[in-house]
Amino acid sequence: MLPTPCEAAGIEHPTDLDGISFLPTLLGKPQKPHEFLYWEIPAGGGQQALRMGEWKGVRQGLMQRLTDLELDNLREDPSESKNVAAQHPEVVARISS
């Protein structure tokens, strides 16, 4: 979130952080598109997620060293009930890199 108040104040944000300003959205202007969104949640044994277009990759059980990636197509399956990782290895490879 830090890039947002920095842009509003007209100052540069630190370059060693991962984030984009959402000030354009707050001002009702077009938002600069971003390639992906990434987040981590330490609860529940550790989780990682990445959203890239219509795809969402999730890893759960990081503390137990489980590294299998669940892949969901949010356009075709918005409830995220069908893991399609086996059918789309190229997307899994891109998300995993």
Image (spheres, rainbow, N blue to C red):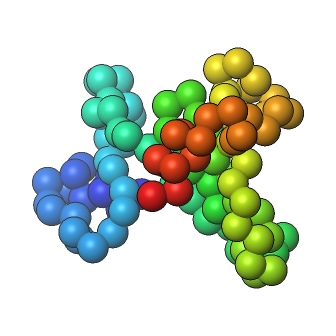
Q: Residue 57 vs residue 22: left or right?
A: right
Task: List x then y, in percent, for residue 82.
Answer: 82, 33
- Residue 56's place in the image compared with 97, above or below, is above
Front in this rendered view, residue 96 or 44: 96
The vertical placement of 3 against 74, above or below, is below
Residue 27 visible to an observer of this rendering: no
Percent coordinates x, y for residue 63 in the rendering: 76, 81
- Snapshot quadrant of residue 36: top left
Q: Position of residue 62 (x, y in %)?
A: 73, 74
Among the 4 quarters of the image, the one containing residue 42: bottom right
Out of 68 and 24, give the one closest to the viewer: 68
Q: Is residue 73 visible?
A: yes
Is the N terminus in the top left, top right, bottom left or bottom right quadrant? bottom left
Q: Which quadrant, please, contains the C terminus? A: bottom left
Q: Residue at x 56, y 28 (%)?
A: 54
Residue at 30% over, 23% down: 30
| 29 relative to 59 in the view: left or right | left
Decide if residue 64 is on the left or right side of residue 13.
right
From what the image shows, is residue 8 above or below residue 17?
above
Q: Is residue 78 above or below residue 55?
A: above
Q: Position of residue 95 (x, y in %)?
A: 51, 49
Q: What residue sits 52% from the left and 40% below the top? A: 90
Q: How many marks?
A: 0
- Who's the residue at 73% across and 48% down the image? 70
Q: Looking at this view, is 38 or 29 the one in front?
A: 38
